[in-house]
C-alpha cells in the first residue's frame, strides 16, 4: 500500500484558501508572474496551471534564487502581482528538531510564497514533488512500465524509503549542527569540495554505492555507525571535519525521533535520493537473471549507465504520471492554482 501519511494528511488538513481575487490580477492587464525553482517546475506548471494564459513563468534559479526574488519583491513590490513557489526541502524537519526555539522560523507564512507540497497552516506535507509522487499512486502508475510484479514494485518502494530516511537523517543533522555551531550558510560536513584524495566528493547515493554501503538486491544500507566511519575517512580534509562526529551523533538522534514520531517520516525524505536509488535498483535488475524487470527503453544493453541522466528521465516520467495523484495535490494550498 502507498505510504499511509498521504491518507493522514488528507484527514487532518484544515480548509485553506488563496486570495483568488488577487491571483486573477483583475486590476491589471499584464500577466501574473510565477517564480519557480527550475525548468522541470516550469514544465509541470505549464501543463497544470489554471487559466494558463494569465501566467508568466520564470525560474529562480533554484530555491535560493526564488527566495532572493521574493525578498526583493517585499522590499519594493511592483504594481503587478507575483507568486513564488519553492520546495520545502528539510525546513520543517529542522523546525521539529532544532534545540533553540528563540530563532526565527525557517518556514515563511505568506500567501504569495507557496511551498509545492506543504500546508503551512496544517504543518503537514512533503519536502518536494518527487517525494510526494513517489509515495503516491503515481509511482505505481509509472512502475508498471518497468516491472510486471506488483509485490516487487511495492517492495522496491519500501526498501528505498528505508535507505532514503537514513540519508535524510544525515542531511538534517548536517543542517542542525551547522546552525547550532553558527557555521556559514554554505558550510557542509558531508562533502570534500576541493583538494585531498576526495576532492569534489559529496554524500549522496553514488557515495553510498561506491563505498559499499548499499545493498541494491535487498535495498538496505549499512548501519549508521559504518556509514559514519566511511564519512570520517572520506571527508577527513573537509574544513569542518571537527564537526562531523557531531553530525553522525545527531543523525542517530534524528532516527530515534522518526521512530517515535512516524507521522513525520516523509519530512525526512529527499526526492532526488529516492529517484537515484530507484535508478540504481533498475540498472541492477536489468542485469540480474530472474528479476521481473521487463523494460529496456531507458537503459542501454551494455556500457556504463549515466545514473544522473537516468534519474532525471525517471523524475520526468514520474511527473508525467502526476495526473494519477492530481486530486491529492489539489488539497494543498498550491492546488488553488491548478486546473
Image (cartoon, rainbow, N blue to C red):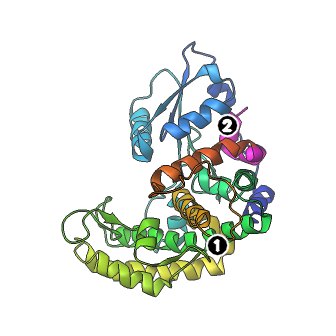
Residues under numbered marks 1 and 2 in contact, where contact means CB atoms less than 8 Å apart = no
Q: Which residue is mark 1?
A: 159
Tell me what residue is drawn at x 55 percent, y 79 percent: 255
Front-most of residues 281 and 111: 281
Q: Position of residue 99 (x, y in %)?
A: 46, 75
Which residue occupies the foreground of this view, 318 or 52?
A: 318
Residue lying farthest to the top in this orientation: 29
Looking at marks 1 and 2 on the same chain, the residue that comes earlier in the sequence is marked by 2
Name the residue at the left extreme: 195
Q: Which mark is residue 18?
A: 2
Q: Residues within 10 Å of mark 2 (few under 14, many from 20)?
A: some
Report the residue at 41% width, 72% height from top: 210
- Label 1 sits on a secondary structure element that is helix
- Whether the magenta-drawn stretch holds residue 326 is answered as yes
- Highlighted magenta segment, given as a residue range: 324-339
Label 1 vs label 2, nearer the camera = 1
Q: Is residue 97 above or below residue 322?
A: below
Residue 125 x, y percent position in the rendering: 65, 56
Judged left or right of residue 227, residue 12 is right
Q: Count residues near mark 1 (Cα–Cα under 10 Å), then give few for <14, some for 14-19, many for 20+.
A: some
Q: Is residue 312 in view?
A: yes
| Above or below: residue 98 compared with residue 89 | below
Q: Which mark is residue 288?
A: none
Foreground: 206 or 244?
Answer: 206
Rendered location of residue 249, percent (x, y)? 43, 84
Amino acid at each position: 500500500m502507498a505510504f499511509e501519511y498521504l491518507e493522514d494528511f488528507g484527514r487532518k488538513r484544515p480548509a485553506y484558501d488563496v486570495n483568488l481575487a488577487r491571483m486573477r490580477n483583475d486590476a491589471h492587464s499584464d500577466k501574473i508572474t510565477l517564480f519557480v525553482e527550475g525548468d522541470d517546475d516550469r514544465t509541470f506548471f505549464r501543463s497544470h496551471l489554471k487559466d494558463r494564459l494569465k501566467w508568466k513563468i520564470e525560474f529562480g534559479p533554484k530555491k535560493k534564487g526564488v527566495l532572493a526574488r521574493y525578498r526583493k519583491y517585499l522590499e519594493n513590490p511592483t504594481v503587478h502581482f507575483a507568486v513564488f513557489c519553492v520546495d520545502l526541502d528539510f525546513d520543517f524537519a529542522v523546525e521539529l528538531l532544532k534545540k533553540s526555539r528563540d530563532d526565527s522560523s525557517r518556514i515563511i507564512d505568506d500567501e504569495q510564497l507557496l511551498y509545492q507540497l506543504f500546508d503551512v497552516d496544517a504543518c503537514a506535507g512533503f519536502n518536494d514533488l518527487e517525494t510526494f509522487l513517489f509515495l503516491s499512486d503515481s509511482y505505481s502508475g509509472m512502475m508498471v512500465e518497468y516491472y510486471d510484479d506488483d509485490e516487487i514494485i511495492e517492495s522496491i518502494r519500501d526498501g528505498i524509503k528505508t535507505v532514503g530516511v537514513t540519508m535524510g537523517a544525515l542531511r538534517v543533522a548536517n543542517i542542525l549542527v551547522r546552525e547550532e555551531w553558527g557555521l556559514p550558510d554554505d558550510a557542509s560536513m558531508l562533502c570534500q569540495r576541493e583538494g585531498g584524495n576526495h576532492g569534489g566528493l559529496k554524500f549522496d547515493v553514488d557515495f553510498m554505492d561506491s563505498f559499499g554501503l548499499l545493498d541494491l538486491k535487498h535495498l538496505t544500507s549499512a548501519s549508521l555507525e559504518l556509514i559514519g566511519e566511511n564519512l570520517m575517512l572520506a571527508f577527513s580534509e573537509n574544513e569542518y571535519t571537527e564537526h562531523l562526529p557531531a553530525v553522525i551523533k545527531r543523525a542517530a538522534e534524528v532516527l530515534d525521533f522518526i521512530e517515535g514520531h512516524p507521522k513525520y517520516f516523509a519530512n525526512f525524505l529527499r526526492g532526488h535520493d529516492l529517484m537515484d536509488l530507484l535508478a540504481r535498483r533498475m540498472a541492477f535488475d536489468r542485469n540480474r537473471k530472474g528479476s521481473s524487470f521487463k523494460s529496456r527503453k531507458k537503459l542501454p544493453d551494455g556500457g556504463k549507465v549515466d545514473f544522473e541522466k537516468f534519474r532525471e528521465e525517471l523524475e520526468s516520467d514520474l511527473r508525467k504520471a502526476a495526473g494519477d495523484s492530481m486530486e491529492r495535490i489539489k488539497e494543498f494550498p498550491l492546488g488553488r492554482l491548478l486546473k
